[in-house]
Image (cartoon, grey):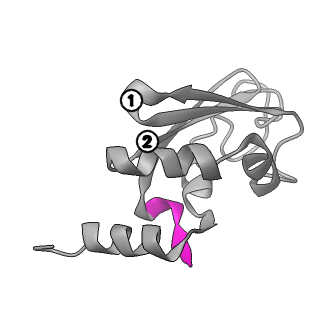
Amino acid sequence: MKVRLIDIAHARSGDKGDTANVGVIALRPEYYPILVRELTVERVSQHFHGMITGPVQRYELPNLNALNFLLHGALDGGGTLSLKTDAQGKVYSTALLRLVLDLPAAEVAAIHRDHTPGA
């Protein structure tokens, strides 16, 4: 079953030189294992295919229920060199939150219960 990443996480992004970073934080601790399983380096690389020219690195932050991704070659040289509209990489978090995950029905049911008032 399909679930948008934005339904189980929020994200922030920024930059350092030609590298954008995207922090993805689980909305609930029980969603963190889903992030770890689903947001692989390969999956994130594919999601940003054509937008970045370098590799993706992933760092796990279990104490924060978060993952941090470094997207190398994302900013066309960086904020002071790039002619890109978003030379600081602020939109990468929004772009990643648009990712659609295909999850087992039981996980999707639990997520929907979490989003139902009074459940």
Residue occupying the far left of the picture:
118
Residues drawn in magenta? 1-6
Residue type of the residue flagged with mark 1:
Leu
Residue 4 part of the magenta segment = yes
Numbered disc 1: secondary structure: helix
In the picture, which quadrant includes the C terminus? Answer: bottom left
Is residue 28 depicted above or below 59 in this figure? below
Q: Is residue 97 left or right of residue 72?
A: left
Residue 110, percent from left and from top:
35, 69
Crowding at dot 2, Cα within 10 Å, few <14 / some 14-19 / many 20+, comes out as many
The CA distance from mark 1 to mark 2 is 7 Å
- Quadrant of the rendered image containing residue 115: bottom left
Q: Which mark is residue 25?
A: 2
Secondary structure, mark 2, is: strand
* Residue 66 place in picture, x, y as percent: 47, 35
Height in image: 108 above or below 97?
Answer: below
Residue 77 versus residue 74: which sits nearer the camera? 74
Indicate the quadrant containing the N terminus: top left, top right, bottom left or bottom right. bottom right
Residue 13, horizontal then vertical, whole percent: 54, 37
What residue lies at 38% left-to-right and 29% top-to-bottom? 64
Residue 64 image label: 1
- Total count of labels: 2
- Residue 23 among magenta residues: no
Amino acid type indicated by mark 2: Ile
Residue drawn 10% across the image and 73% down it: 118
Between residues 20 and 96, which one lies in front from this camera angle?
A: 96
Q: Extreme front residue here? A: 106
